[in-house]
Amino acid sequence: MASVWQGAISFGLVNIAVRLHPAVSGETATFRQIHRDDGGRIRHKRVCEQDGREVDLSQIDRAYEAGGLLVPLTDEDLDHLPLPTHRQIEVLQFVAAKEIAPVHLGRAYYVEPHPVLGAERAYVLLRDTMAETDRIALTRVAIRQREHLAMLRPDANLLVLQLLHWPESIRDPSPLAPPPGVTARPEEKQMARTLIDSLTGHYHPEDYRDRYREALESLVDAKLTGRELEEAPSAPPSIDLIDALNASISQVKASTHKLTDS
């Protein structure tokens, strides 16, 4: 697995040489754009607005717009940004994991102790101490020439670096909440607890699969072979809340009995 970043975790005067690897491989299904009339593939061309000619990717640079002017910036320019986190995961403070709301979480990276530079012992010390104290580290790190707020957390035998969205990018959700006067009745709450209890278990990732990808592959196969397409399930009918809770509890109990009998 190729690393995308090399540097060091820095907290106090301790530096731990590490490498970052993407934790997620990317989208499981991708689409291409085609011309509706003849099925021809749509290609996006890079055209210079000055001379109208198509430009090869190797001839394209970046620029930052400032006051109506485009200031060219090369990779070398960006590599020399005065950021101390360019090759350093800078620990700002340690906090309880529950203080980080899920909405702030972004892309995750596996953190590998650098095998050549002998960072394993310091890595294990940090990982185990964070796990034993139930703490995560708030950090700053520059990845792909942009500085991010991130959290460093122990996960089994590894440390994981998870990027965090900057606070100003999180939208205010308060207008979306139900009105304060809307409440649930005691019997509804009790039945909801019963349903939640009956559905409570442990998370085993291997028990779940990407049904979207499977459905898409089935759709493509049907189009290629000319067989009849399967109908998508219809939306369930709207029923009374108490009736819905009762039916849900009965359904879970029946399913549990069936698994027990088998």
Image (cartoon, rainbow, N blue to C red):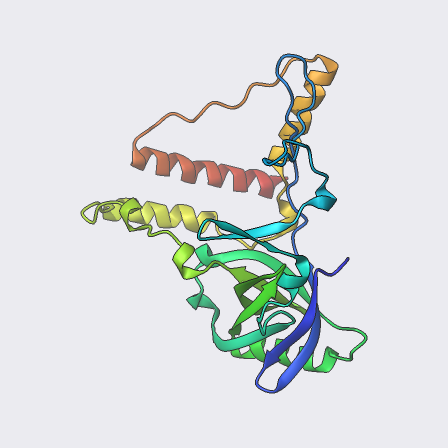
The residue lying furthest to the left in this view is 181
Q: Tell me, yes or no, if residue 223 can be seen here.
A: yes
| The N terminus, quarter of image | bottom right
Query: Which residue is more in the foreground, 64 or 224?
Result: 64
Q: At x 53% / y 63%, what residue is drawn? A: 148
The residue lying furthest to the front in this view is 51
Q: At x 53% / y 65%, what residue is drawn? A: 150
Query: Which residue is more in the foreground, 234 or 52?
Result: 52
Query: Which residue is more in the foreground, 54 or 132?
Result: 54
Query: Which residue is more in the foreground, 138 or 32?
Result: 32
The residue lying furthest to the right in this view is 116
Q: At x 78% / y 80%, what residue is drawn? A: 118
User: Residue 163: x, y in percent?
Assistant: 55, 61
User: Residue 239: x, y in percent?
Assistant: 33, 29
Placement of 202 over or under 157, stated as above or below: above
Q: Is residue 136 left or right of residue 241?
A: right
User: Residue 6: x, y in percent?
Assistant: 71, 68
Placement of 8 over or under 34, stated as above or below: below
Q: Is residue 132 left or right of residue 170?
A: right
